[in-house]
Amino acid sequence: MSSLNREAVFLILQFLDEEKFKDTVHKLEKESGFYFNMRYFEECVSNGEWDEVEQYISGFTKVDDNKFSMKIFFEIRKQKYLEALDRHDRAKAVEILVKDLKEFSKFNEGIFKEMTLLLNLGNF
């Protein structure tokens, strides 16, 4: 994308932010991939909004882009899994394990097995 288009996106982001269109700002940040809003990201992490965290970061990197991206996505999904276990929501924990974490087992089978064993703990 040309630098002129990039500048236009930044101006639009600035306008939307000033007019308090927060959801639109974050969608444009994610869709354009030009500006990573660390404050917004930290806020989502602090609030435990893991689906939003993963969706936001996916606008800037993909799971298989590099080892750091893989680690970020793994940690997000692991946290979702651990929180489901903490709430005693075994069904959700199993769903996260099978749908979200299974893909990482090919890189580290040991960690995946350990996480699976957590399902058996009665007093997590």
Image (cartoon, grey):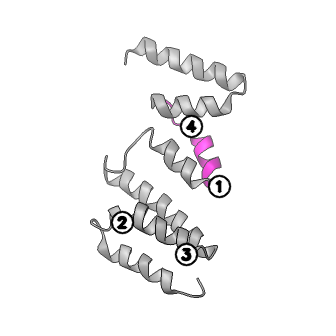
The answer to which of 56 and 36 lies nearer the viewer is 56
Outermost front residue? 91
Amino acid bearing label 3: Arg
87 to 57, vertically: above or below: below
Q: Which residues are magenta?
A: 34-45
Percent position of residue 97, x then y:
44, 68
**Label 3's element?**
helix
**Among numbered discs 3 and 2, the one appearing first in the sequence:** 3
The residue beneath circle 2 is 102
Which residue does the image show at 36% across and 66% down from the upper left? Answer: 102
Which residue does the image show at 67% across and 26% down from the upper left? Answer: 17
The residue beneath circle 4 is 37
Please say if the residues under marks 3 and 2 sit with CB atoms less than 8 Å apart.
no
Task: Label the magenta part by its dominant secondary structure.
Answer: helix
36 to 113, vertically: above or below: above
In the image, is residue 15 part of the stretch drawn in magenta? no
The residue beneath circle 1 is 46
Determine the CA span between mark 4 and mark 1: 14 Å
**Among numbered discs 1 and 2, the one appearing first in the sequence:** 1
Amino acid bearing label 1: Ser
**Label 1's element?**
helix
**Among numbered discs 4 and 3, the one appearing first in the sequence:** 4
Percent position of residue 110, x then y:
33, 77
**Label 4's element?**
loop
Q: Residues within 10 Å of mark 1 (few under 14, many from 20)?
A: few
Determine the CA span between mark 1 and mark 2: 25 Å
38 to 72, vertically: above or below: above
